[in-house]
Amino acid sequence: MSTPFIYPILTLAQEDAPPRPPAATPTADQAATTGQPAGDPGTPQAKPPQGMPPFFFIIFAALIFMIIFSMSGQRKEKKKREALLTSLKKGDRIQTIGGILGTVVEVRDEHVVVKIDENTNTRVKLSRTAVQSVLQEKNE
């Protein structure tokens, strides 16, 4: 709806524009020295087709490298955690994901019984996956 109003304005602006001076066309001698083709400069010259710039290949390679690098880090962390959970034994001091500190009393297939209070002999049954780390005791 606004197009009919714009088109006459653009047409008028083009009609009011000053005429361009004709461009000088290089002769065959000038074309040989400057490397420009002889002929009418108003005709578009065909450019050779260009492939994808090497910049995109560099970005693509960096992206692939980052994905592989992050996957290998996750794999190492998973193996380390799995080794920690399989090496749990009676008497280990542990910290759970929730921050509970205690001593392992009993180790079962899927669960761990942890003693969290020495005075009242409070014991908690936890999933093995709730164990975050095994604490090292300082030898004094």
Image (cartoon, helix red, strand yellow):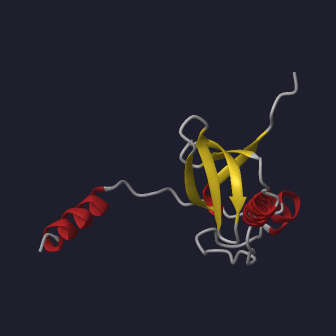
In this view of the protein, which residue sits in the foreground, 133 or 36? 133
103 over 106 or under it: above or below: above
Residue 130 lies, in percent from the top left, at 60, 57
**Residue 47: quarter of image:** bottom right
In this view of the protein, which residue sits in the foreground, 22 or 34? 34
**Residue 106: quarter of image:** bottom right
Quadrant location of the N terminus? bottom left
At horizontal 77% and vertical 70% (from top left) the residue drawn is: 37
Answer left or right for 134 relative to 17: right
**Residue 70: quarter of image:** bottom right
Q: How many marks?
A: 0
At horizontal 75% and vertical 65% (from top left) the residue drawn is: 71
At horizontal 76% and vertical 67% (from top left) the residue drawn is: 64
Answer left or right for 17 relative to 110: left
78 over 51 or under it: above or below: above
In this view of the protein, which residue sits in the foreground, 135 or 5? 135
Q: Residue furthest top?
A: 140
Residue 42 lies, in percent from the top left, at 58, 70
71 over 138 or under it: above or below: below
Residue 80 lies, in percent from the top left, at 81, 58
At horizontal 57% and vertical 59% (from top left) the residue drawn is: 125
Answer left or right for 134 relative to 35: left
Quadrant location of the C terminus? top right
Residue 66 lies, in percent from the top left, at 75, 59
